[in-house]
Amino acid sequence: MSVTPAAALSCLPWSPADAYLQAAASESAYNVIAGELRFDENLLPQSHADNPNDIPPLTQIPAQLSGKMLEGKYFSGRVNVPAVLEVECLGPWCGGMKSGADYVFFAEQQGQDLVIRAGACGGFAFDDTPEVRRQVLDCHRGAACEPAMPR
């Protein structure tokens, strides 16, 4: 019997508060939008059985972002704009999301493009739940904004 180490990706906990704090500390401009991203899911990177590590480290997918942008204290400004979904892969592990599902996005403004990152260890999109919105709004309003793990 032979024993081989299990291959696994180990990620630190990541929450909407972490994304908010990272975006706020960045020199880039971010828009926080609750809505949906529509894109061709067939363009998401796929691991190949013959060589699971043969995946590009970054895949850019054209998308359409619609929803409500965080303005002032609430999600109120309607948006319907083109965006780019950047999917990161670390070996065979890739970020991803579902087209048309409800998320809260942290979209980075890069020139004319809004870029949403889906990292292998978490990204800048979270399921749109009351808890996620509460965390984002608390951070935005200057209330408690605690990262998932002290950094």
Image (tube, grey):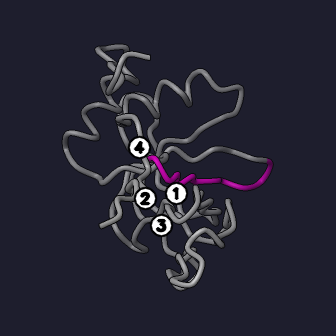
Mark 2–mark 1 Cα distance, whole angstroms, equals 5 Å
| Comes first in the chain, label 1 or label 3 | 3
Q: Count residues near mark 2 (Cα–Cα under 10 Å), then give few for <14, some for 14-19, many for 20+.
A: many
Q: Residues within 10 Å of mark 3 (few under 14, many from 20)?
A: many
Would you say the residues marked 2 and 1 are in contact, meaning their CB atoms lie under 8 Å apart?
yes
Q: CA distance from mark 4 to mark 1?
A: 35 Å
Q: Residue furthest left?
A: 130
Residue occupying image coordinates x 33% and y 30%: 137
Give amino acid for label 3: Leu
Write down the region rendered in magenta. Answer: 111-121
Residue 27 in picture, x, y percent from top left: 71, 26
Residue 75 location, x and y as percent?
A: 37, 42
Residue wearing tag 1? 79
Q: Are marks 1 and 3 in contact (CB under 8 Å)?
A: no
Instruction: Estimate the spatial distance between the alpha carbons at disc 2 and disc 3, rounded to whole Å.
Output: 9 Å
Q: Label 3, on which residue?
A: 37
Question: How far apart are labels 4 and 3 at the CA level?
Answer: 27 Å
Circle 2 or circle 4, nearest the eye: 4
**First in sequence: mark 4 or mark 1?**
4
Give the mark toward the camera: 1 or 3. 3
Question: Is-magenta flag for residue 27?
Answer: no
The 10 Å Cα crowd at callout 4, few under 14, some 14 to 19, many 20 or more, is few
At which x and y percent is residue 36?
42, 64
